[in-house]
Amino acid sequence: MIGIPNIKYIGNYEKEIQAEDDAFDNIVLYKPIDFFVMADNRNKFVKSCEKMCRSDEDYAGFVKYVTNIIGIDFCQVSSQIFSTDATIEMHHGPLFTLYDYASIILEEFIETGKKITTYRITNQLIQEHYDLHVQVVMLAVTNHEAVHNRDIFLNIKQGFGDVSGFIEKYNKYLSDNQKYRIWKYLDLCESTDSFDNNIFDTEKVKKLVTL
């Protein structure tokens, strides 16, 4: 194995590396549970997982799968706009953002005592995409911006992906705030018209998520 200059692998349970000229300057590979007690630490960690996911080649492969294989190469708000006309981007939602998915998966790791690294969380996050448990909506750039600005309302049934399957798998790890958001959003969806492709089982999710 080729050595990294001035770096020595310690090899203990925490998987630390340290500089040879400073025995106290260690980098921990696995994050201990108490690292996530501070909200700022948790937020930065989840954002780093989110960033790593977006830059992964398998993530890019999933985007191509949705557009080229599934055939959603058009804006799901303005269906007359195709990828040949404008840039079509993948939006995570409308229920959960990519940050939400990463945060929920992290909570599952914490609660079940799994070893935690950005790589492990990101790998599971990408796997959930390929398991089609992550709901996405394909949007033209201008509509994507409008959604983030809350100028366009996306009904839960406008997305692609079995988000109810994700909720069924991870419902024990949802925060009270996330549960409240689910109920509030489902109520809004039921009162707001949108097309329905039967991908979201609202009654099933209501039974899974108890307030």
Image: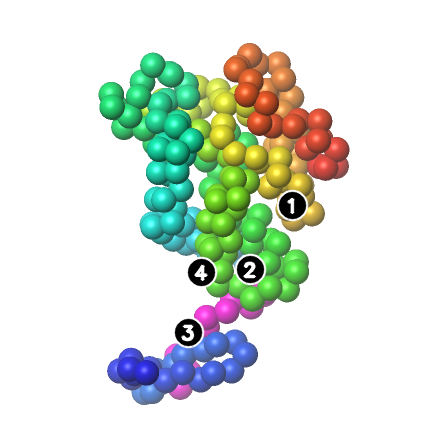
Q: Can you identify the residue that label 3 sits on?
A: 27
Rounded to the nearest whole Å, what is the CA distance between mark 4 and mark 3? 15 Å
Mark 2 and 4 residues: CB-CB less than 8 Å, in contact?
no
Is 202 one of the magenta-colored residues? no
Q: Label 2's element?
A: helix
In this view of the protein, which residue sits in the foreground, 166 or 198?
198
Q: Give amino acid for label 4.
A: Tyr
In this view of the protein, which residue sits in the foreground, 1 or 207?
1
Q: Can you identify the residue that label 4 sits on?
A: 119
**194 w.r.t. 8: above or below:** above
Give residue 64's quadrant in the image. Answer: top left
Q: Can you identify the residue that label 1 sits on?
A: 169
Mark 1 vs 4, N-terminal side: 4
Q: Which residues are magenta?
A: 23-35
Q: Label 3's element?
A: strand
- Within 10 Å of disc 2 (Cα), the crowding (few <14, some 14-19, many 20+) is some
Does residue 51 appear left or right of residue 94 in this picture?
A: left
Mark 4 vs 3, N-terminal side: 3
Viewer-side label of 1, 3: 1
In which quadrant will I find the C terminus? top right
Residue at 37% across, 16% down: 78
